[in-house]
Amino acid sequence: MTIISPDEYTLLMSLTGNEQNLQAENIGKKYGLGARKILNMLPNQTQSSVSQSSEIATNNQSTVDANIPIQNSHRFEYDPSPDASQRREQVSQAITCPSCGVALGIPAIRPIKVTCPQCLEEHTFQE
């Protein structure tokens, strides 16, 4: 039987519902196990509650909310300064933030230091 780390075990025990299922899935990927097997390792987890919670997660993934507002109507300018449009014209590459995965547009200048507007982490890209 695979043993998960004490930190991961404590984290799983502190979570409930969908958050616990998502974290179990992430931990399961690390150890090559399914989320159901990870959740079964926890005390006070009956098979019916595990299958019921995974069934709810499956149902949530298959439904689409048709009432999602159009994203373009909610966009805002991150940098309101007058020279922001000039910098936007210099954007030639798209990368993802290593910390949070948000898409970032950057110029081809290297090395470049970028502060992510989503997570506010600063990264330097060499290539």
Image (cartoon, rainbow, N blue to C red):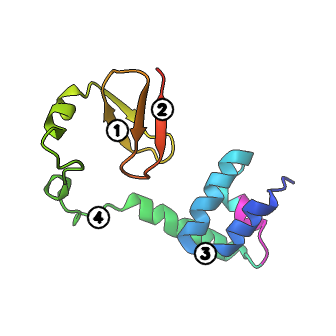
Seen in the picture, residue 45 relative to 92 is either above or below; the reply is below
Q: Nearer the viewer, mark 1 or mark 3?
A: 1
Left or right: residue 104 compared with residue 32: left
For the residue marked with disc 2, what is the amino acid? Thr
Give the residue at x 70% y 46%. Answer: 30
The percent coordinates of residue 5 (x first, y second) are: 80, 57
The percent coordinates of residue 112 (x first, y second) are: 41, 28
Q: Which mark is residue 16?
A: 3
Seen in the picture, residue 22 relative to 52 is either above or below; the reply is above
Left or right: residue 106 compared with residue 15: left
Q: Which structural element holds mark 4?
A: loop
- Please say if the residues under marks 1 and 3 sit with CB atoms less than 8 Å apart: no
- Please say if the residues under marks 4 and 1 sit with CB atoms less than 8 Å apart: no
Read off the magenta span.
Answer: 37-43
For the residue marked with disc 1, what is the amino acid? Leu
Q: 106 or 113: which is nearer to us? A: 113
The percent coordinates of residue 89 (x first, y second) are: 17, 29
Q: Residues within 10 Å of mark 1 (few under 14, many from 20)?
A: some
Q: Which residue is mark 2?
A: 124
Q: Which mark is residue 104?
A: 1
Q: Which mark is residue 45?
A: none
- Please say if the residues under marks 2 and 1 sit with CB atoms less than 8 Å apart: no
Question: Closer to the N terminus: mark 2 or mark 3?
Answer: 3
Q: Nearer the viewer, mark 4 or mark 3?
A: 3
The percent coordinates of residue 95 (x first, y second) are: 39, 32
CA gap, disc 1 to disc 3? 33 Å
Q: Is 120 one of the magenta-colored residues?
A: no
Question: Closer to the N terminus: mark 2 or mark 1?
Answer: 1
Q: Residues within 10 Å of mark 4 (few under 14, many from 20)?
A: few
- Quadrant of residue 38 in the image? bottom right
Q: Which structural element holds mark 3?
A: loop
Q: Which residue is mark 4?
A: 65
